[in-house]
């Protein structure tokens, strides 16, 4: 599969950022090119004894690189190599570019503000059950370059973030998916226009033989589609048109608006790929969902507890929240710039809201006058108050909805760490009942 014209072969390459994608790029390219490594965290451990680990900017600036592979988490405008990267902007690529330059396999690349991981996971399970050699990579699962034993028949389901797409120059996908777009990551992209442009790099890179699946009734997507003519065939997924297969599903997981939206895309893709509908229904009925994404962690006749730690914006919380009643909503963390709660006061009449952490005032701006709010700095204190309140409310089913609507980095390593901590607290309170 390797061709001599490959732009990474035998080149002098800097890999900037030694997270999962950076390390996978190094391991993949190390024997194919002259590879150098750099990370903003100079103390970061790297097990391989590479003599080409650059430990300061001065050493790096003396080398003329042919290519620079940058990790998605790095902000070109706010990092140790900002000046260097601006001078070498035309040399910047991503691990997805490397992946595409070596493998021209069919891929289905999924992006959007909400639902990427869940949709990618559902589609991966669907394709495996239909006997595809299917790999789940990108923002979910392994970095693409970590995959082994790839054949010409291997199909990739790729979850792609706006960060990855923004830096990519070569990558393209046979099938692209934009689930939805709402304001997100504005602190990184600087404005909404740049964020939307990053998502639409997926369509910009596609050929006339490609297909793009997009949400039909999405204002921001439709506005962008009208701005120019795109090469791929555009399939608009109408969430209001109920696929006949949905009526055959018994899985309660797909009752929420957000998960039904994810499912609608999977069904449309399955239709285009001409998948076996009987096998498809069995797969969907078995689907359990992902950890910390609208995950029911406890249920009895009086109480449901949902861990949705993955939620980092109001839009992601709203998808399920608007279908719930008698809710204790727990949110907090680092709010997204420009984020807004689009629920009316009428929608929120059965909610009690608890905000944890240090950003109470910023969350309050969006929520005030819509529902009762209480601020307690620590999650354990919030749960203590909720469980005390529940002692007098055993006549109807109540829901504790942990959906932070903010990033986790104020107190946790990531959303998984936050979700795990919430589960630990819940177990202590349930055992004490």
Image: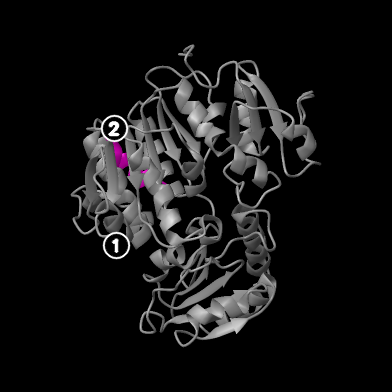
What secondary structure do most residues of the magenta stretch adopt? Answer: helix
**Which of the 4 quarters of the picture holds residue 60?**
top right
Does residue 166 lie above or below 403 as drawn?
A: above
| Closer to the camera in the image, 414 or 131 | 414
Judging by the rendered image, the residue that carries numbered circle 2 is: 207
| Residue range highlighted in magenta | 279-288
Residue at 56% x, 68% y: name it: 335
Badge 1 element: helix
Asked if the residues shown at circle 2 and circle 1 are in contact, with their CB atoms under 8 angstroms apart, the answer is: no
| Closer to the camera in the image, 192 or 312 | 192
**Which of the 4 quarters of the picture holds residue 23?**
top right
**In the rendered image, which quarter contains the C terminus?**
bottom right
**In the rendered image, which quarter contains the N terminus?**
top left
Cα–Cα gap, marks 2 and 1: 25 Å
- Mark 1 Cα within 10 Å, few/some/many (few <14, many 20+)? few
Q: Nearer the viewer, mark 2 or mark 1?
A: 2
Judging by the rendered image, the residue that carries numbered circle 1 is: 219
Q: Is residue 89 visible?
A: yes
Residue at 39% x, 74% y: name it: 342
Q: Position of residue 266 (x, y in %)?
A: 31, 44
| Closer to the camera in the image, 262 or 236 | 236
User: Is residue 199 toward the left or the right of residue 94 in the image?
Assistant: left
């Amino acid at each position: 599969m390797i061709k001599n014209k490959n732009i990474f072969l035998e080149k002098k390459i800097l890999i900037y950022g030694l997270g999962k994608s950076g390390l996978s790029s190094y391991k993949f390219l190390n024997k194919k090119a002259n590879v150098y490594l750099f990370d903003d965290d100079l103390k970061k451990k790297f097990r391989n004894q590479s003599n080409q680990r650059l430990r300061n900017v001065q050493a790096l600036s003396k080398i003329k690189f042919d290519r620079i592979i940058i990790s998605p988490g790095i902000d070109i405008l706010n990092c140790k190599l900002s000046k260097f990267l601006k001078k070498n902007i035309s040399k910047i690529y991503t691990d997805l570019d490397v992946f595409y330059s070596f493998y021209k396999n069919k891929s289905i690349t999924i992006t959007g503000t909400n639902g990427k991981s869940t949709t990618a996971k559902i589609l991966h399970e669907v394709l495996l059950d239909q006997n595809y050699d299917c790999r789940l990579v990108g923002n979910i699962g392994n970095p693409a370059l970590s995959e082994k034993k790839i054949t010409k028949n291997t199909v990739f389901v790729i979850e792609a973030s706006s960060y990855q797409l923004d830096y990519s120059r070569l990558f393209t996908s046979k099938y692209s998916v934009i689930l939805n777009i709402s304001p997100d990551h504005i602190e990184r992209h600087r404005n909404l226009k740049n964020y939307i442009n990053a998502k639409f790099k997926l369509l910009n890179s596609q050929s006339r033989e490609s297909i793009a699946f997009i949400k039909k009734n999405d204002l921001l997507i439709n506005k962008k589609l009208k701005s120019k003519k795109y090469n791929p065939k555009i399939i608009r997924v109408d969430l209001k048109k109920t696929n006949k297969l949905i009526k055959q599903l018994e899985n309660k997981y797909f009752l929420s608006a957000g998960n039904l939206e994810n499912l609608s895309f999977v069904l449309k893709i399955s239709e285009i790929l001409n998948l076996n509908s009987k096998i498809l229904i069995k797969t969907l009925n078995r689907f359990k969902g992902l950890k910390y994404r609208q995950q029911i962690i406890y249920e009895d006749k009086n109480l449901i507890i949902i861990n949705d730690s993955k939620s980092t914006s109001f839009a992601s919380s709203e998808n399920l929240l608007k279908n719930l009643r008698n809710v204790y909503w727990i949110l907090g963390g680092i709010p997204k710039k420009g984020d807004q709660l689009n629920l009316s006061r009428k929608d929120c009449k059965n909610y009690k809201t608890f905000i944890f952490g240090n950003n109470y005032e910023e969350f309050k701006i969006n929520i005030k006058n819509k529902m009762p709010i209480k601020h307690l700095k620590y999650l354990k204190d919030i749960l203590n108050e909720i469980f005390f309140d529940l002692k007098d409310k055993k006549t109807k089913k109540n829901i504790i909805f942990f959906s932070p609507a903010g990033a986790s980095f104020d107190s946790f390593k990531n959303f998984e760490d936050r979700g795990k901590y919430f589960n630990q607290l819940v177990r202590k309170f349930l055992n004490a009942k």
